[in-house]
Amino acid sequence: MTATATSAPLLNGQLIGITYHAIAAVRDRLLAASNLTFHQSVALKAVADGLDSAGAVDRLTSTLKIGESEAHTLLDELADAGLIDGARRSLTDKGDSLQREFTDAVTELTERLYGDLPAAEREIAARALAHVTARANAELAAQ
């Protein structure tokens, strides 16, 4: 059986990349209002989740694929902006407010993008992406 023009595309790197960039463009518009970069927003979330400095650095290096030095720089930037306390153990009031606003905006965006997709399809996609991520991480570790 051959694929037709109306066939659903197969999951591959190109499709994942196109999807990522479309979502990232929308996300970056949300972030523009906060004057945060995506990497800074991930660092702010790590602190919001209660991670100490070492835990936040670990999350940043593993999820963003950056070095420890860059992770520390991100946390320093948040401290300099008054969003986290100097010890990097908690959000300031300003940081908490910004984190809540961004989380609310992302929640609304998520509903618009994914809300009407059947849960079973979302679960299948999540499992497939988790497997691809694990394999890509294994490739990185082997190099």
Image: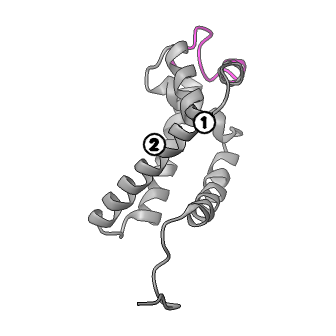
Write down the residue under mark 1: 64
| The stretch drawn in magenta includes residue 86 | yes
Q: Which mark is residue 134?
A: 2
What residue span does the magenta drawing correspond to? 76-91
Overall secondary structure of the magenta stretch? loop
Q: Residue at x 68, y 38 (%)?
A: 36
In x, y percent, where is residue 4? 49, 91
Q: Quadrant of the C terminus?
A: top right
Counting residues from the start of the chain, the first of labels 1 and 2 encountered is 1
Left or right: 119, with 105 as reference point = left
Residue 105, percent across and down? 51, 50
Q: Is residue 33 above or below residue 140?
A: below
Q: Nearer the viewer, mark 1 or mark 2?
A: 2
Residue at horizontal 59 percent and vertical 27 percent from the top: 61
Above or below residue 66? Residue 88 is above
Please give left or right for residue 134 compared with residue 38 in the image: left
Q: Which amino acid does the dot numbered 1 rest on? A: Leu
Residue 51 is labelled as none
Residue shown at the point (71%, 39%) measured from the top left = 35
